């Protein structure tokens, strides 16, 4: 079985399709609902576009989509946690991307 990183939106989609939830799943569903930034299909598309356009790892793209940063400082903060530095042009492109979605 292959594993992959999923966004909060995708986790919400998976959990919300279940008819019954145990306590942990119910808590997770509530968390996901509180922090949704994209619809599930939009989140998947955004992750793919970030990987393709900015050559970043899937886990980094997922984190950016989950947070949906609005400023260069927020983006830089996330990327620095993964040891990634982008050009000023790429940072500006990411700010534009997340502010138009």
Image (spheres, rainbow, N blue to C red):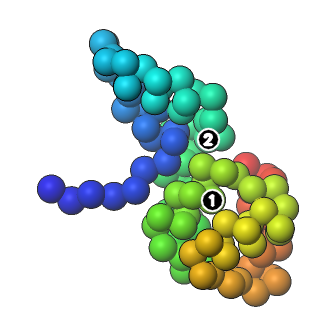
Can the viewer see residue 52 in this picture? no
Give the x, y percent position of residue 28. Answer: 46, 29
Label 2 crowd (10 A; few <14 / some 14-19 / many >=20): some
Tag 2 near tag 1, CB within 8 Å: no
* Direction from residue 62 to residue 78 in the image, left or right: right
Rendering quarter of residue 18: top left
- As drawn, the residue found furthest toward the front would be 23
Compute the Cα span from label 2 to label 1. Answer: 11 Å
* Direction from residue 8 to residue 15 in the image, left or right: left
Give the x, y percent position of residue 30. Answer: 53, 23
Residue matched to label 2: 38
Can the viewer see residue 37 in this picture? yes
* Direction from residue 90 to residue 92 in the image, left or right: right
Residue matched to label 1: 64
Residue name at image x 51 percent, y 42 percent: 8
- Vertical relation: 2 (above or below) 37: below
């Amino acid at each position: 079985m292959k594993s992959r990183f999923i966004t909060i939106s995708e986790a919400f989609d998976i959990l919300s399709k279940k008819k019954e939830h145990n306590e942990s799943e119910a808590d997770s569903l509530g968390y996901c609902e509180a922090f949704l930034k994209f619809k599930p299909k939009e989140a998947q598309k955004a992750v793919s576009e970030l990987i393709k356009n900015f050559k970043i790892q899937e886990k980094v793209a997922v984190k950016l989509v989950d947070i949906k940063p609005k400023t260069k400082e927020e983006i830089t903060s996330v990327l620095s946690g993964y040891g990634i530095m982008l050009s000023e042009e790429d940072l500006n492109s990411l700010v534009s991307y997340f502010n138009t979605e």
